[in-house]
Amino acid sequence: MSKPNPTDRLYSKDHEWILDRGDGTALVGITDYAQEMLTDIVFVELPPIGKKVAAGEPLAVVESVKSVSDVYSPAGGEVIAVNTALENAPELVNRDAFGEGWIARLKLADARELKTLLDAAAYDALILEEKH
């Protein structure tokens, strides 16, 4: 069963989360629901440092025993850090999607884009809708 979605971050309809760090940067990852649907994650293709992405563009790739899925950036920006721990331990995404399983840190191009994303309650409603 998925863990509750933390209320300190925002969510995309594609099942990514973004945590605004308040300093013009944000962490990005996939939700617990997404990792649960993917099942066992065996590989994470991290984006290169310096990569610029627009909201909704592919940021990374997550490969599970079931499928290969793009991870879309919930907001535009430049990749300034990646979670290199995932190179040797991609299962961190399964174990702790909202913590140790983060994928990239972005320097946000425009923090106002975050206003278009879902809060935890709206994301919970989206998941409920998808399950029915």
Image (cartoon, helix red, strand yellow):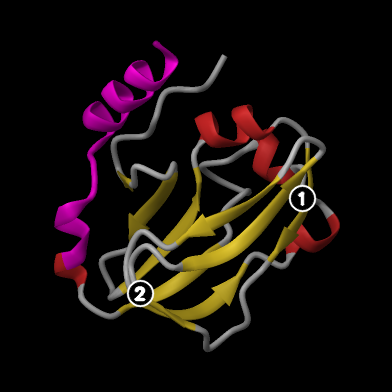
| Residue at the far bottom in the pictured view | 50
Task: Identify the residue position indicated by label 1 in the image.
Answer: 90
66 relative position to 18: left or right: right
Question: What type of secondary structure mainly makes up the magenta span?
Answer: helix
Q: Which of 101 and 70 is in front in this view?
A: 70
Q: Name the residue under label 2.
A: 54
- Look at the image and give the residue range highlighted in magenta: 113-132
Q: In this view, does 98 lie to the left or right of 77?
A: right
Give the label, 1 or 2, closer to the camera: 2
Q: Residues within 10 Å of mark 1 (few under 14, many from 20)?
A: many
Which quadrant holds residue 47? Answer: bottom right
Report if residue 75 lies within the magenta region.
Answer: no
Crowd rating for badge 2 (residues with CA inside 10 Å; few <14, some 14–19, many 20+): some
The residue at the point 42 percent across, 73 percent down is 106
- Which three-letter amino acid code belongs to the residue tagged 2? Ala
The residue type indicated by label 1 comes to Pro
Q: Which residue is drawn at 77% across and 35% down?
A: 66
Residue located 36% across and 59% down the image: 74
User: x, y percentage for residue 59?
Assistant: 52, 67
Residue 39 point in image, percent of width and height: 71, 30
Q: Position of residue 9 (x, y in %)?
A: 32, 46
